[in-house]
Image: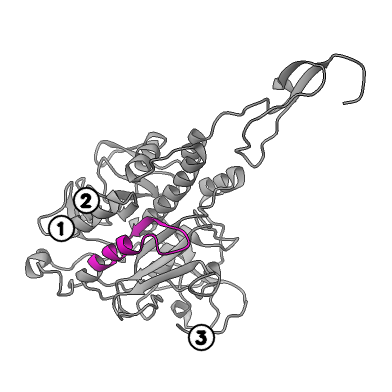
Amino acid sequence: MRSVPWRRAPRRGARFERFEDRIVLSAIPGTDGWYAQTPDLVNPLPDWQDTAPAVAPLAVDAAAHSDAAYVRDTYGFEGIGQTVAIIDSGIAYWHEAFGGGFGTGHVVVGGWDFSERDADPHDDGPAGFHGTHVAGIIGSRCGVHTGVAPGVDLVALRVFNDMGLGYSSWVEEALRWVHNHRNDFRYPITTVNMSLGAKWNGAAPPSWGILEDELATLRADGIFVAVAAGNSFAQYGLPGLAYPAASPHVVPVASVDAAGALSGFSQRLGRVLAAPGEKITSTVPDHVFGADGVHNDWAAVSGTSMAAPYVAGASVLVREAMQLAGYTAIDQGVIYAHLRDTADLVFDPATGTTYHRVNLSAAIDALMPADDYGSCPADAFDLGMLTDTWTVSGRIDRLDDRDFFQFTAAANGVV
């Protein structure tokens, strides 16, 4: 644990104007066939690393999660009662958006650092920032840039060291860790985000895809696993996914721009869910701006790495809504099918294929029952002749729920 003073100061931010041309922290291995050289997953992947693009100050702008804001304001869903595990570069938990602390009573309730083999998964420099940015998209509790599911608890599983270098065995260990510790916290781990991957463009896992057993286990646990689709469409020019997004046990996530069209860099395949992934403003560690001891830094970054946590957060809210609606067997397949059924269709001229873009407000609206009674005087529910007392029962599913009734009194008097 780090003892770092926390004080409030004007927020700072940066905009990364180019997307990261990598995954695994959106990293892509620099050479083909690296798995043939490391079949036992003990040796490091050649460039499972992250080097942050140049940064420049910017004015803090409004968060671009209008659908999530609608769900919060209309139904009050924030993800309370669930924990999300983020397998990435760690989380800078001193950030004000995470409450400035680590462990019980904080947003980041636990985790493990597989690079330093200890229980402090802080997102350290000089290379770290990616996991913190992902975490903010899911669970930031800052009023300016609120995460998709700001009520969730977070677990940080750090699989990259200070220089952004990682071992494939650490990713495997992290997946096993989720299974073994899924019920160890105040709230169960229901969701995993993996904004990472290896260079690949296929519809199925490659022969060297060695995470399948662990991913299948999490799927059997009922855990929703969102994985970035990859940023190399310009290189391949054909439908396909990076790995592990190509695994049948996960939900692959492509990126769309502000207009809702597929991002030019985003890898894609028919089964993806698409979500916002361009110029997404979120949390970054203090060291990104020179480590002044004020943990309130923000940056805008693009990539499928930013789209995956949006879907991870959306799955949390859908699960919460399903629980309220009385669903009893909620797992990845059920949530994925619902998000797909309520999605907007996006035609992609580059591949001649129609893809599914998550419509979070439609997904939640579809789960909520119709209003029990009239919502305005014009459609007030008629109670008929009221002679004494009348008891009505129903549900209040919206924060703005208003019910109107009309009746005929059997006698003169005061109501």
Q: Which residues fall within the magenta stretch?
A: 172-195
Q: Is residue 234 visible?
A: no
Q: Quadrant of the N terminus?
A: bottom left
Residue 185 part of the magenta-drawn span: yes
Residue position marked by numbered label 2 in the rendering: 246
Q: Quadrant of the C terminus?
A: top right
Residue position marked by numbered label 1 in the rendering: 209
Earlier sequence position, callout 1 versus callout 3 = 3
Residue 317 part of the magenta-drawn span: no
Give 326 or 87, whichever is nearer the viewer: 326
Left or right: 206 as drawn, with respect to 345: left
- The colour style of the image is one colour
Q: Is residue 59 visible?
A: yes
Residue 305, image x, y percentages: 35, 59
The residue positioned 38% from the left and 75% from the top of the image is: 121
Mark on residue 73?
A: none
Mark 3: few/some/many CA within 10 Å (<14, 14-19, 20+): few
Q: Are marks 2 and 1 in contact (CB under 8 Å)?
A: yes
Q: Nearer the viewer, mark 3 or mark 2?
A: 3
